[in-house]
Amino acid sequence: MKIGYPCINWSLECKGNRTFRLRSYSVKRLKETVENNLDCLFKILKYNLDHNILFFRISSDLIPFASHPVCKFKWQRFYRKEFKKIGDFIKKYKMRISMHPDQFVIINSPDKKVLARSIKELSYHAAILGAIGLDASAKIQLHVGGKYLDKEKSLKSFIERYQKLSPSIKKRLVIENDDKIYNVADCLRVHRQTRVPILFDVFHHSINPSNLNLTKILQKIKKTWKKKDGILMVDYSYQQQGKMKGSHATSINIKDFKKFLKLSRPFDFDIMLEIKDKEKSAVKAIKTAKSDKRFIKRVILKKEGEI
DNA sequence: TCACGTCAAGCAGAT
DNA sequence: ATCTGCTTGACGTGA
């Protein structure tokens, strides 16, 4: 069990997800931004290591407009050294990495243009993880997609489209139960047809449940992850009181988290805390989880001063 | 330096 | 019809 947070670290000065407007696109601007983002990503990973945070979701904004036709820049080759440095660090300390393309990436959309853009965006995500040199345990998580007035048809559409994806995307793609349409049971149906692993989102399940309980879910979902995929990933959050349904919590509730750790035994998984205050909640969660037998502490190096 | 209109991209549900 | 949430406000122009 590793615990992590997505994309942004509020304690550090720098941001690894800086971007700019399409109108201001230039190779110079892109380079400046990417250099900042890669440099900051490395700083975040160092911060994470110092705080025992061994799971991290890399921002989709790492290379702005990478999947847009405007971008002809060969960033993979140009930043080979930087990617290697980041990758070596991640591998050395056995960190887990994921990515989550944003809401525009939809595989089952009836609009072919949306599908084409989505595939380009997925290729970009796979290219990042490949450039960093990570194996198939570094995942790209996606929802099944829209309903389009016919859930059955739309679910089947996802399955058909998934089967046509390139091996480099399939190697990393996992599907996540969402908060409105496709619950865990629906994801399991997709899995049976595609063998795609399922990422369990605790919060979405609480809003859009299936009739399975937590133990049953973990039992079933665990089997969807093969050895090469690594142990399963779980997204953890809960409803922010007083906000609209679906709003993520601003800060972790340790009492609830403890309960979740207890209820989820003996299953082992990596936990992504989708909580607004990011690393602050991760640090708190780790303090709580440290006594749990499943929790993995940072690798202690014999030679100190290596980082 | 700051206010504020706008930003590549989709979709569903609440209001 | 418009707004909100989703991984999240932040970019950029004009004053």
Image (cartoon, coloured by chain):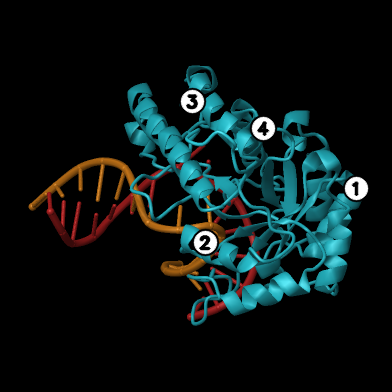
Chain colours: A cyan, B red, C orange
Mark 3 and mark 1 residues within 8 Å of each other at the beta carbon:
no
Is A213 in front, or is A54? Answer: A54
What is the crowding at mark 4: few (fewer than 14 residues within 10 Å), some, or many (at least 20)? some
Mark 2 and mark 4 residues within 8 Å of each other at the beta carbon:
no
Residue with the mark numbered 3 = A82
What is the crowding at mark 1: few (fewer than 14 residues within 10 Å), some, or many (at least 20)? few
> Which sits earlier in the primary sequence, circle 3 or circle 1?
3
Looking at the picture, which amino acid does disc 4 mark?
Leu
Q: How far from the left and from the top, in percent, is residue A137? A: 73, 40
What is the crowding at mark 2: few (fewer than 14 residues within 10 Å), some, or many (at least 20)? some
Residue with the mark numbered 2 = A283
Q: Is residue A78 left or right of residue A155?
A: left
Residue with the mark numbered 4 = A134
Distance between the alpha carbons at the discs numbered 3 and 1 = 39 Å
Mark 1 and mark 4 residues within 8 Å of each other at the beta carbon:
no
Q: Secondary structure at mark 1?
A: helix
Distance between the alpha carbons at the discs numbered 3 and 4 = 14 Å
Mark 3 and mark 4 residues within 8 Å of each other at the beta carbon:
no
